[in-house]
Amino acid sequence: MREVIDLVAGDNGVEVYLEDTGPEDAPAIVVLHGGPGGSSYTLREGLAEYLEDFRVLYLDQRGGGRSPALPEEPGLFTIDALLEDLFLLRDHLGLDTWTLLGHGFGGLVALDYARRSPQTTRRLVLINPWTNFPWLASQLYRASLGLRGIVERDVEVELPPDGTGLLQEAFAHVEPKAAFDKLMFPSPHSRMEYEWMAESSTVVGAATPGRMFVLNGLWRLDYTPFLLEVHVPTTVLLGSLDASSYPEAQTIADLTGGDLELIEGAGHYPWIDQPYAFSEALQNALQDAQ
């Protein structure tokens, strides 16, 4: 299989790591990982067999994964900056249009690219996307209560509109990873399988992008009002057991007029939990992308 590994130069000396795979003349899909600060490695491991008929671009977003580290400057880590990298990448590759496949936080990046450049977006495929961060903060707070054996109805708390207070309260008592794991993984087996895949890569997610996005107010961002401005074909693949996105992400399909594929029994990484159902759902989502 064709594979080209590259560092694509952007503005201000920023470079992003790219794996350009599959037939060069096939329809292109750019894969946008979660995080912020993650890597496309585990997505390639999980998705490659389903995307063999496409030219697939596995991108490590700026400052994360195998992309070069960047200074801790909040101005380098904005949604606008991530989108500018995508515009430069598409121009670098000479692509008129492409499909964007976003997972978790990458779903937000995909949606905003499509909102701003519908003419270059063939379609969106969003897997357990994160777009309402105050809601996600409330889910993490509830997860922290559960990990401490506290019943939510026994706690009187007023949810702050920006979610920051809840997040601080949650992480004051439990490790962030423990809270995220409780939301994303339906079983210890699926968590261990994902961790085995991630740890075997030796690619360590960078902390700087996440910290800078927090400073930029990520946990105050509810993207819901902007969804009505997204006018490209959209499919949301949603694991019914992923409490980091379900049921909130159903709103994305409703407001964009897109399709919703609910994968029963799946968490944040549905190809691990329900590979057959996920394969069918993804194939349906990509029918018109070829």
Image: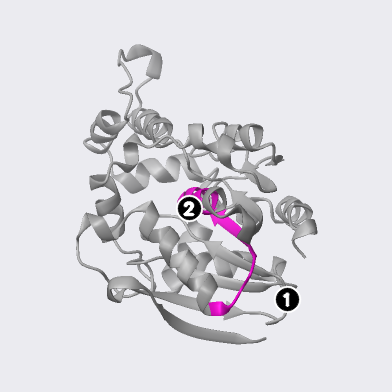
Q: Is residue 208 shown above or below 264? A: below
Residue 62 horizontal/vertical position (percent): 36, 66
In the rendered image, the vertical position of residue 162 relative to residue 37, given as above or below: above
Which residue lies at the image location 66% right of the left edge and 48% below the top edge?
232
Q: Give how far across and how far down residue 227 sits, in percent.
A: 55, 37
Q: Please count the marks in the image.
A: 2
Which residue was labeled with disc 2? 109
Direction from residue 4 to residue 54 in the image, left or right? right
Quote the CA–CA distance across marks 2 and 1.
Answer: 23 Å
Residue 75 visible (yes or no): yes
Figure coloring: one colour
Q: Would you identify the image quadrant in which residue 9 lies?
A: bottom left
Whether residue 36 is visible, yes or no, is no
Which residue is at a point 23% across and 35% down the rendered structure image? 168
Q: For the residue marked with disc 2, what is the amino acid?
A: Val
Q: Is residue 238 above or below residue 63?
A: above
Q: Which residue is mark 1?
A: 26
* Place of residue 67 in the rendered image (x, y in percent of width and height, measured from the top left): 37, 74
Q: Is residue 84 left or right of residue 265?
A: left
Q: Amino acid at mark 1?
A: Ala
Label 1 packing within 10 angstroms: few (<14), some (14-19), many (20+)? few
Evaluate if marks 2 and 1 touch, with contact meaning CB atoms under 8 Å apart. Answer: no
Q: Is residue 259 magenta?
A: no
What residue is at 57 percent from the left and 69 percent from the top?
44
Q: Quadrant of the C terminus?
A: bottom right
Quadrant in which the N terminus is drawn = bottom right
Mark 2 Cα-neighbour bin, 10 Å: few <14, some 14–19, many ≥20: many
- Bounds of the magenta span? 93-113
SS class of the residue under badge 2? helix
Examine the rendered structure and indicate whether residue 181 appears above or below residue 169: below
Residue 182's label in the rendered image is none
